[in-house]
Amino acid sequence: MIKKLLSGNEAVAEGALESGVEVVTGYPGTPSSELIPFLADIVKKENLKVYVEWSVNEKVAFDIATAAAWSGKRVLITMKMAGLNVASDTLINIANKGVNGGMVIYVTDDPGTHAGCTEQDSRFYSLISLAPILDPSNPMDAKNLTKIAFEVSEKIQIPVILRSTTNVSHTMGIVECDSYSSSLNRFEFKKDAQNYTTVLADRVNQRRLLLKKHVEVLELFNKFNLNQLDIKNNFGVIASGVSWTYLQEIINYFGLELSTLKIDSENPWPETKVRKMIQNVNKILVLEEQEPIVETMLKKTMVNTKKVIPVLGKEDGTLSRVGENNLENVADALSKLINKKLEFEEKIQIDINKIKSYKLERALTFCTGCPHRATYYIINEAIKKLGFKQDEIIVTGDIGCTSLGVYKPLETLWTEVTMGASIGLAYGFKIAGATKPVIATLGDSTFFHSGIPPLINAMQYGCDLTVIVLDNLWTSMTGFQPNPNTGLNLFGKPSNIVSISAITKAIGAYTITISPYEIEKSIDIVAKTISKKGLKVIISKEECVLQKVRHGIKNIPYYIDQEKCIKCGACIKNTSCPAIINDNNEYFIDKNICTGCGICAQICPVNAIKREEK
Amino acid sequence: MIYNFLLVGIGGQGIITLSKILATAAMSKDLKVIVTYKKGLAQRGGSVGAQVRIGDVYSPLVPKYSANSLLSMDMNETFGYIDYINKNTILMINTKIINDNTFLSKKDKVKKEEIKQLQKSMNDNIVFIDTKLEIKQKDVSKGANIYMLGVLFGMDSRINSFIKKDDIISSIKKNLKKNTELNIELFNKGIQFIQDKQVNSI
């Protein structure tokens, strides 16, 4: 046993390797993205026989892993909450059909939406699919529950959802690690269309069997000592996920005595333990993030036990259904439960809000030298060149770095919803009656993930639409994962390149490629392309500058010729490039961070921005 | 025992590295440690915050008004964490501000005075350091974080009760494979800074 400092995501990877996982697939998405690279690093270093890939999207990842699980292999699929929506069709089917090798679906929720996603409680996917769920509270817990998930999944032949949240996935804690399993399962997939097809299957019986499996899962969970109950007095607290750690902190800090039940699994529901809790206490506080699922189940159990006692939770307003829990709101809720004020430290005698207001907020903007900055500038200028105002031309956006085009100073984008939605929305605006040009923008990874079907749809019904793919060769925002366009797998080994232009041409769209760093020329091409009839695709191709710098490709930086500079500020106003500094109306370029993209030099009206001498 | 470190700054200033150095040092003493990072949209040059909790801890988050020390690599970022300090918190602020053209408003430049108002309510436990000024002779653009860590270690003797100077030095060696000797020198210089200034350490 070795102690390691690991994040929740990394701990799940450790747990999977200790369980003998053989196939790992997923699509990047905050806060889940770190799992696969961490696992791949170990696989490479230890020369383990594990297949790992970033798949084109979550549904594809799920389908690939399903076949491996049906063949007896242990599989892990990773995604963020939005990804499970994409893969949910497969999940619900596979829960009914069952698996042979253990299958664990790792999904991360983001209460408080720190990663910029819509709040979603993925525990509902367990309720809808009947796949059992495990809900870790910290990294050590995450590793243990991963191992239990594999054991239970393989034994009962049912996929298991392991659901984490940001404060578990991104928290680093001490994890006790064992050696990696080397016992691998043999490939074996027998033809059995009665089970593996939906048309031939006895679907009603599959459903019955699934419900029966739930009883067996709960028995196993009890054997693994999950959902621990500790009766001490009349005050009951039921807690799940990271809220359990807040409860432990407060109990220890204030030396409290409470009866507690840790919910490791909301489904199957530990009915017997909950009943025991209800019988032994007079009041119960429920601590969980997002939706009141545990609270609702608790109330159902109360009705069954015919002992209804007060419940503090989300429905009475003690805690919120929005945002995340923290020590303060959990301490307040506990204060209400035990009628005693719990305060960690005395407030300092200052006006906190006044001092907080001193903070100057920083604008979100593209990285220094990002080609997307250039592309959005080009789109804005092309719109002007066609005689339109920026507020007249609908430009839809998509997920990833490209979404930063919504911020100042470019403010190109009107919408940004889900993966690939830019094209479907743009087409929708046209058929709904937009008479002026409509432009859709999306990144390369997003295009592969969900951008192709709406493009085919637009082609089938015919429509004047311009789609701009901002192709930077990487899935950058989530940490530079390779995609079908990169030419590398996640071990850095060469893989086939899937050409975006070959796809768009095959669909039948007029396709042209631009280099975003060539500003004037590109404005011209974009303006002309927008004016064309029919479905057009412009591929704005330039590698992510951060990746280029990592590969050692760094262009010569620029400087501002102070004698020529007329101090108009056009360079900053149009780009908000972090490398340009305005020091009391004197403009400078920080040559340490300038990547030499040259966008500002092309924007400067008096050509005062020049390349440094070599 | 519980000790809560808050480390704040801008992407690229070495906040994550500092958190790893402290966590590794704590682990070498067999202490429990939990590290959490401030979450947000991935953006280079954006604000970065780390919470390093050592001792009898369970929660990844530091309770409000409960930071034992706040090490800030960027004065502007300090304001955002002011509800974590109490009258015994050691506040360590780098006065050098970077990337100021990405500020949304430029009406006022960040001023020391605004934080100095705090000084009375905080038993004078505030140190301002211009790392650019203090370590410029070495021409080290990076390493300011390690220098600041040295200042904090020199200032707050409470840390010495659970992690010794040598533990941090061996942790620097483990975590920084490049410029290791230089970083150790900067750590020592940070400790020296406090001794020279004769600031009342606690």
Image: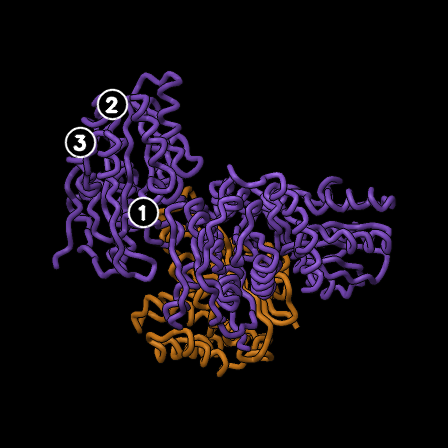
Residue contact between numbered discs 2 and 1, judged by CB atoms under 8 Å: no
Tell me, for residue A525, which label it has, or none: 3
Q: Residues within 10 Å of mark 2 (few under 14, many from 20)?
A: some
Q: What amino acid does circle 3 point to? A: Ile
Label located before the other in sequence (2 or 1): 2
Q: Name the quadrant containing residue A250.
A: bottom right
Is residue A403 or residue A47 the one in the foreground?
A: A47
- Rendered orange, the chain in question is B
Residue A186: x and y in percent read 46, 64
| Secondary element at tag 1 | loop
Vertical position of residue B112 compared to residue A463: above or below: below
Vertical position of residue A297 compared to residue B53: above or below: above
Q: Colour of chain A?
A: purple
Q: Which residue is mark 2?
A: A534
Q: Residues within 10 Å of mark 3 (few under 14, many from 20)?
A: some
Q: What amino acid does circle 2 point to? A: Gly
Label 3 resides on the chain identified as: A
Apparent side of residue A536 relative to residue A78 in the rendered image (left or right): left
Residue at 36% x, 75% y: name it.
B177
Residue farthest to the bottom? Answer: B166
**The C terminus of chain A appears in which quarter of the rendering?**
bottom left
